[in-house]
Image (tube, rainbow, N blue to C red):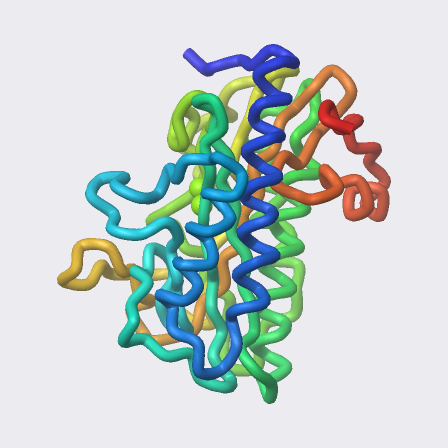
Amino acid sequence: MLEIKNPAQIAKMREAGLVVAAIHAATREVAVPGATTKDLDDAARKVLAEHGAKSNFLGYGGFPATICTSVNDVVVHGIPSADEVLQDGDIISIDCGAIIDGWHGDAAYTAFVGSGHSAELVELSRVTEESMWAGIAAVAKGNRLVDISKAIEGYIRRQPRPASGKYGIVEDYGGHGIGSQMHMDPHLLNYVDRKRGRGPKLVPGFCIAIEPMVNLGTAKTHVLEDDWTVKSNDGSWSSHWEHSVALTEDGPLVLTAPDGGKAKLASLGIIAAPDPLA
Ligand code: MG
Ligand code: MG
Protein backbone atom coordinates (compact mmCIF):
# COMPACT_ATOMS: atom_id res chain seq x y z
CA MET A 1 0.00 0.00 0.00
CA LEU A 2 1.33 3.40 -0.96
CA GLU A 3 0.90 6.32 1.45
CA ILE A 4 -1.28 8.90 -0.32
CA LYS A 5 -1.02 12.37 1.21
CA ASN A 6 -3.78 14.96 1.59
CA PRO A 7 -3.08 18.63 0.79
CA ALA A 8 -2.41 19.50 4.46
CA GLN A 9 0.20 16.74 4.67
CA ILE A 10 1.81 17.89 1.41
CA ALA A 11 2.01 21.40 2.90
CA LYS A 12 3.92 19.94 5.89
CA MET A 13 6.24 18.11 3.50
CA ARG A 14 6.77 21.42 1.70
CA GLU A 15 7.82 22.98 5.02
CA ALA A 16 10.33 20.16 5.52
CA GLY A 17 11.44 20.50 1.90
CA LEU A 18 12.21 24.19 2.33
CA VAL A 19 14.42 23.37 5.33
CA VAL A 20 16.31 20.92 3.12
CA ALA A 21 16.66 23.66 0.47
CA ALA A 22 18.04 25.97 3.17
CA ILE A 23 20.62 23.32 4.16
CA HIS A 24 21.65 23.07 0.51
CA ALA A 25 22.13 26.83 0.32
CA ALA A 26 24.12 26.93 3.58
CA THR A 27 26.38 23.99 2.73
CA ARG A 28 27.09 25.37 -0.77
CA GLU A 29 28.69 28.39 0.90
CA VAL A 30 30.91 26.17 3.06
CA ALA A 31 32.03 23.70 0.35
CA VAL A 32 35.29 25.47 -0.56
CA PRO A 33 38.92 24.28 -0.58
CA GLY A 34 40.23 23.91 2.98
CA ALA A 35 36.85 23.21 4.57
CA THR A 36 36.31 19.84 6.19
CA THR A 37 33.26 17.71 5.56
CA LYS A 38 32.50 18.12 9.28
CA ASP A 39 32.22 21.89 8.66
CA LEU A 40 29.44 21.05 6.21
CA ASP A 41 27.69 18.88 8.79
CA ASP A 42 27.95 21.70 11.36
CA ALA A 43 26.35 24.12 8.87
CA ALA A 44 23.49 21.67 8.31
CA ARG A 45 22.90 21.17 12.05
CA LYS A 46 22.66 24.93 12.49
CA VAL A 47 19.99 25.27 9.78
CA LEU A 48 17.96 22.39 11.26
CA ALA A 49 18.09 24.02 14.71
CA GLU A 50 17.13 27.45 13.33
CA HIS A 51 14.01 25.96 11.73
CA GLY A 52 13.07 23.73 14.67
CA ALA A 53 13.42 20.73 12.36
CA LYS A 54 14.68 17.26 13.21
CA SER A 55 17.27 15.32 11.23
CA ASN A 56 16.12 12.15 9.51
CA PHE A 57 19.75 11.20 8.74
CA LEU A 58 21.24 11.38 12.24
CA GLY A 59 20.84 7.95 13.82
CA TYR A 60 19.21 6.39 10.75
CA GLY A 61 20.46 2.80 10.93
CA GLY A 62 23.16 4.23 13.20
CA PHE A 63 24.33 6.93 10.73
CA PRO A 64 26.47 9.35 12.80
CA ALA A 65 25.80 12.69 11.04
CA THR A 66 23.05 14.98 9.69
CA ILE A 67 24.24 14.89 6.07
CA CYS A 68 26.06 12.54 3.74
CA THR A 69 29.20 14.00 2.17
CA SER A 70 30.38 11.98 -0.83
CA VAL A 71 33.63 13.23 -2.35
CA ASN A 72 34.93 12.29 -5.83
CA ASP A 73 34.73 8.48 -6.23
CA VAL A 74 32.35 8.19 -3.26
CA VAL A 75 28.91 7.64 -4.79
CA VAL A 76 26.69 8.08 -1.72
CA HIS A 77 26.59 7.78 2.09
CA GLY A 78 29.98 9.36 2.82
CA ILE A 79 30.36 10.24 6.52
CA PRO A 80 31.44 13.80 7.39
CA SER A 81 34.79 13.97 9.20
CA ALA A 82 37.04 16.63 10.74
CA ASP A 83 39.94 14.80 9.04
CA GLU A 84 38.56 15.10 5.51
CA VAL A 85 39.68 18.39 3.96
CA LEU A 86 38.16 19.47 0.65
CA GLN A 87 40.71 20.13 -2.09
CA ASP A 88 40.58 22.49 -5.06
CA GLY A 89 39.21 20.43 -7.97
CA ASP A 90 37.16 17.99 -5.87
CA ILE A 91 33.50 17.31 -6.47
CA ILE A 92 31.19 16.59 -3.57
CA SER A 93 27.64 15.30 -3.38
CA ILE A 94 25.75 16.49 -0.32
CA ASP A 95 22.60 14.61 0.67
CA CYS A 96 20.42 15.67 3.58
CA GLY A 97 16.93 15.75 4.97
CA ALA A 98 14.64 17.30 7.54
CA ILE A 99 11.51 16.38 9.50
CA ILE A 100 8.77 18.88 10.35
CA ASP A 101 5.86 17.62 12.50
CA GLY A 102 6.63 14.05 11.44
CA TRP A 103 6.81 14.79 7.68
CA HIS A 104 10.03 14.23 5.76
CA GLY A 105 12.06 15.95 3.04
CA ASP A 106 15.17 14.53 1.33
CA ALA A 107 17.37 16.03 -1.41
CA ALA A 108 20.95 15.98 -2.73
CA TYR A 109 23.17 17.98 -5.05
CA THR A 110 26.68 17.81 -6.48
CA ALA A 111 28.97 20.82 -6.00
CA PHE A 112 32.33 21.73 -7.51
CA VAL A 113 34.98 22.58 -4.94
CA GLY A 114 37.18 25.47 -6.10
CA SER A 115 37.87 25.59 -9.83
CA GLY A 116 39.59 23.89 -12.73
CA HIS A 117 37.19 20.98 -13.17
CA SER A 118 37.35 19.11 -16.46
CA ALA A 119 34.55 19.58 -19.00
CA GLU A 120 33.79 15.89 -18.47
CA LEU A 121 33.09 16.38 -14.74
CA VAL A 122 30.95 19.44 -15.39
CA GLU A 123 29.00 17.42 -17.94
CA LEU A 124 28.68 14.45 -15.52
CA SER A 125 26.94 16.64 -12.96
CA ARG A 126 24.78 18.35 -15.60
CA VAL A 127 23.66 15.03 -17.09
CA THR A 128 22.85 13.63 -13.63
CA GLU A 129 20.89 16.73 -12.60
CA GLU A 130 19.00 16.89 -15.90
CA SER A 131 18.14 13.20 -15.70
CA MET A 132 16.58 13.92 -12.29
CA TRP A 133 14.49 16.70 -13.87
CA ALA A 134 13.46 14.38 -16.70
CA GLY A 135 12.24 11.99 -13.99
CA ILE A 136 10.41 14.80 -12.20
CA ALA A 137 8.73 15.78 -15.48
CA ALA A 138 7.31 12.24 -15.66
CA VAL A 139 5.51 12.65 -12.30
CA ALA A 140 2.11 13.10 -13.92
CA LYS A 141 -1.41 11.73 -13.47
CA GLY A 142 -1.92 8.60 -15.57
CA ASN A 143 1.79 7.72 -15.70
CA ARG A 144 3.21 4.68 -13.95
CA LEU A 145 6.27 4.41 -11.72
CA VAL A 146 8.25 2.91 -14.62
CA ASP A 147 7.71 6.09 -16.64
CA ILE A 148 9.89 7.95 -14.12
CA SER A 149 12.64 5.30 -14.42
CA LYS A 150 12.35 5.36 -18.21
CA ALA A 151 12.67 9.15 -18.33
CA ILE A 152 15.80 9.15 -16.11
CA GLU A 153 17.57 6.37 -18.01
CA GLY A 154 16.42 7.66 -21.41
CA TYR A 155 17.84 11.11 -20.71
CA ILE A 156 21.27 9.71 -19.75
CA ARG A 157 21.41 7.28 -22.68
CA ARG A 158 20.64 10.05 -25.18
CA GLN A 159 23.69 12.10 -24.12
CA PRO A 160 27.02 11.88 -25.97
CA ARG A 161 29.34 9.44 -24.21
CA PRO A 162 32.10 11.03 -22.12
CA ALA A 163 35.55 10.84 -23.71
CA SER A 164 36.80 8.50 -20.97
CA GLY A 165 34.17 5.84 -21.65
CA LYS A 166 30.57 5.76 -20.51
CA TYR A 167 28.08 6.85 -17.91
CA GLY A 168 27.47 4.15 -15.31
CA ILE A 169 23.93 4.45 -13.97
CA VAL A 170 24.19 3.09 -10.43
CA GLU A 171 21.76 0.21 -9.88
CA ASP A 172 22.53 -0.66 -6.27
CA TYR A 173 20.58 2.36 -4.92
CA GLY A 174 17.58 4.31 -6.12
CA GLY A 175 14.71 6.62 -5.31
CA HIS A 176 11.89 5.93 -2.88
CA GLY A 177 8.51 6.93 -1.60
CA ILE A 178 8.67 9.58 1.14
CA GLY A 179 6.21 11.06 3.63
CA SER A 180 5.66 9.96 7.23
CA GLN A 181 9.00 8.15 6.86
CA MET A 182 12.07 9.03 4.82
CA HIS A 183 12.18 5.71 2.98
CA MET A 184 8.89 4.13 2.01
CA ASP A 185 7.48 2.10 -0.86
CA PRO A 186 7.83 2.19 -3.76
CA HIS A 187 11.51 1.75 -4.60
CA LEU A 188 12.32 3.72 -7.75
CA LEU A 189 14.91 2.34 -10.15
CA ASN A 190 16.99 4.79 -12.17
CA TYR A 191 16.77 2.41 -15.13
CA VAL A 192 14.11 0.15 -16.61
CA ASP A 193 14.04 -3.46 -15.48
CA ARG A 194 11.51 -5.21 -17.72
CA LYS A 195 11.10 -8.03 -15.18
CA ARG A 196 9.63 -5.59 -12.66
CA GLY A 197 6.54 -4.54 -14.57
CA ARG A 198 5.22 -1.00 -14.80
CA GLY A 199 4.67 -0.30 -11.09
CA PRO A 200 1.81 1.64 -9.52
CA LYS A 201 -0.19 4.33 -11.27
CA LEU A 202 0.70 7.86 -10.17
CA VAL A 203 -2.21 9.60 -8.48
CA PRO A 204 -2.55 12.93 -6.65
CA GLY A 205 -1.04 12.58 -3.17
CA PHE A 206 1.78 10.33 -4.42
CA CYS A 207 5.19 11.55 -3.16
CA ILE A 208 8.57 10.29 -4.33
CA ALA A 209 12.26 11.08 -3.89
CA ILE A 210 13.94 10.95 -7.30
CA GLU A 211 17.72 10.48 -7.06
CA PRO A 212 19.89 9.36 -9.96
CA MET A 213 23.52 8.48 -9.22
CA VAL A 214 25.83 8.41 -12.24
CA ASN A 215 29.49 7.38 -12.39
CA LEU A 216 32.04 8.41 -15.00
CA GLY A 217 32.79 4.73 -15.55
CA THR A 218 31.42 1.51 -14.16
CA ALA A 219 27.98 1.43 -12.52
CA LYS A 220 29.26 -1.13 -10.01
CA THR A 221 29.80 -0.08 -6.39
CA HIS A 222 31.06 -1.46 -3.07
CA VAL A 223 30.64 -0.47 0.58
CA LEU A 224 33.71 0.34 2.70
CA GLU A 225 34.53 -1.14 6.12
CA ASP A 226 32.67 1.69 7.87
CA ASP A 227 29.48 0.02 6.55
CA TRP A 228 28.31 3.30 4.95
CA THR A 229 30.67 4.81 2.38
CA VAL A 230 29.78 3.61 -1.12
CA LYS A 231 32.49 3.88 -3.79
CA SER A 232 32.57 3.11 -7.49
CA ASN A 233 34.48 -0.12 -8.18
CA ASP A 234 36.82 1.45 -10.74
CA GLY A 235 37.49 4.66 -8.80
CA SER A 236 35.51 6.75 -11.28
CA TRP A 237 34.01 9.95 -9.90
CA SER A 238 30.31 10.14 -9.28
CA SER A 239 27.43 12.62 -9.20
CA HIS A 240 24.19 12.43 -7.21
CA TRP A 241 21.17 14.72 -7.47
CA GLU A 242 17.86 14.34 -5.63
CA HIS A 243 14.57 16.12 -5.07
CA SER A 244 11.45 15.09 -3.18
CA VAL A 245 8.36 15.56 -5.36
CA ALA A 246 4.60 15.51 -4.68
CA LEU A 247 1.99 14.89 -7.35
CA THR A 248 -1.02 17.15 -6.63
CA GLU A 249 -4.35 17.70 -8.38
CA ASP A 250 -2.61 20.68 -10.02
CA GLY A 251 0.51 18.87 -11.18
CA PRO A 252 3.93 18.22 -9.67
CA LEU A 253 5.34 20.22 -6.77
CA VAL A 254 9.09 19.91 -6.19
CA LEU A 255 9.00 19.98 -2.40
CA THR A 256 12.75 20.55 -1.90
CA ALA A 257 13.25 23.23 -4.59
CA PRO A 258 13.08 26.85 -3.35
CA ASP A 259 10.58 27.76 -6.09
CA GLY A 260 8.74 24.42 -6.01
CA GLY A 261 10.32 23.54 -9.35
CA LYS A 262 8.40 26.29 -11.14
CA ALA A 263 11.17 27.72 -13.34
CA LYS A 264 12.81 24.45 -14.37
CA LEU A 265 9.51 22.69 -15.05
CA ALA A 266 8.32 25.67 -17.13
CA SER A 267 11.43 25.23 -19.32
CA LEU A 268 10.27 21.63 -19.84
CA GLY A 269 6.74 22.76 -20.76
CA ILE A 270 5.18 21.76 -17.41
CA ILE A 271 3.29 23.98 -15.01
CA ALA A 272 4.30 23.27 -11.40
CA ALA A 273 1.58 23.09 -8.77
CA PRO A 274 1.12 26.28 -6.75
CA ASP A 275 3.16 26.42 -3.55
CA PRO A 276 0.79 25.58 -0.65
CA LEU A 277 2.81 27.87 1.67
CA ALA A 278 2.90 30.88 -0.68
MG1 MG B 1 16.65 9.68 -0.80
MG1 MG C 1 18.81 11.73 0.02
Q: Residue at x 66, y 30 (%)?
A: 139
x, y (%) of residue 25? Answer: 61, 56
**Quadrant field for ligand 1:** top left
Q: Nearer the viewer, residue 225 or 34?
A: 34
x, y (%) of residue 244? Answer: 56, 37
Q: Which part of the image, by quadrant, shows the N terminus?
A: top left
Q: Residue at x 54, y 47 (%)?
A: 242
Number of marks in picture:
0
Q: Is residue 29 visible?
A: yes
x, y (%) of residue 122? Answer: 62, 74
The relative height of residue 191 versus residue 231 in the rendered view (above or below) is: above
> Residue extending furthest left?
225
The relative height of residue 88 versus residue 127 in the rendered view (above or below) is: below
The relative height of residue 263 versus residue 56 in the rendered view (above or below) is: below
> Residue extending furthest front?
50
Q: Nearer the viewer, residue 39 or 3?
A: 39
- Tell me: 46 left or right of 158: left
Q: Which part of the image, by quadrant, shows the C terminus?
A: top right
- Tell me: 81 left or right of 199: left
Q: Residue at x 62, y 52 (%)?
A: 131
Q: Residue at x 43, y 21 (%)?
A: 180
Q: Is residue 188 visible?
A: no
The relative height of residue 252 versus residue 164 in the rendered view (above or below) is: above
x, y (%) of residue 277? Answer: 72, 26
